[in-house]
Amino acid sequence: PENGALREALSQKGALLTEFPLATAPLAENFPRRNRIISALSRGVVVVEAGEGSGSLITARYALEQGREVFAVPGNVTCSGSRGVHALIKEGAKLVERVEDILEELGIEPMGAQSLPKPPCFSLTPQEAELYTLLCQGPLQMDDIIVQSALTAGEVSATLLRLELKGAIMQLSGKRFAVS
């Protein structure tokens, strides 16, 4: 129910991989199995924050078992949320200070500003155009988008998802959205 719009969009234009029946609730005990699939589909895993016993460490272990790269962003040595990351670095995870560290390790050439593609042309519904116009003014949190638009929370969520699938916008941390 909570991610129904996402599931529907993925069924139309993407892929939904799961070991569980579709009606399975998002239970914490299932997250490691889900993350095993995610790490298997990835070239590498970046751990930004992980306390001792964190689920992120389980995902990093899966990545190592699957022959994937494990990257770790160091944190404050007095912060308990950094202990797991620092343990990964001690065990051989690649220390990351900037995006280029990851790109270099994976053998990916960074894109220069001059080689960025032009924004894609896409047709927008009136609801999509309304939200896209709002986001052209700068990144916004979902709650702010709901307040500033004439749409319900459900409509905003579904519309943002459609815009993401079209490549028009991207989701940032903290449920913030911005134009791609």
Image (tube, rainbow, N blue to C red):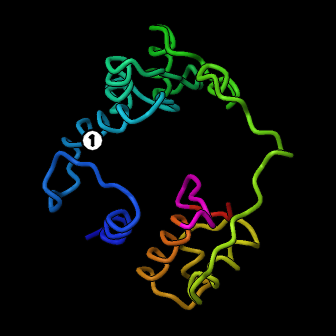
Q: Does 166 sit left or right of 1 as displayed?
A: right
Q: Residue at x 35, y 31 (%)?
A: 40
In the image shown, does 148 or 63 lie closer to the viewer? 63
Q: Which residue is mark 1?
A: 34
Q: Residue at x 50, y 15 (%)?
A: 93
Decide: is 102 above or below 23. above
The image quarter in which residue 68 lies: top left
In the image shown, does 53 or 97 lie closer to the viewer? 97
Q: Residue at x 63, y 67 (%)?
A: 168
Q: Does 167 sit left or right of 43 as displayed?
A: right
**Residue 169: in magenta span:** yes
Decide: is 110 above or below 95. below
Q: Quarter of the image containing the C terminus?
A: bottom right
Q: Which residues are magenta?
A: 166-175
Residue 70 lies, in percent from the top left, at 47, 21
In the image shown, does 137 or 14 lie closer to the viewer? 14
Mark 1 surroundings within 10 Å by alpha-carbon count, few (fewer than 14), some (14 through 19), many (20 or more) = some
The image quarter in which residue 155 lies: bottom left
Q: Does 71 sit left or right of 40 as displayed?
A: right
Residue 137 lies, in percent from the top left, at 76, 73
**Residue 53: in magenta span:** no
Q: Residue at x 50, y 25 (%)?
A: 82
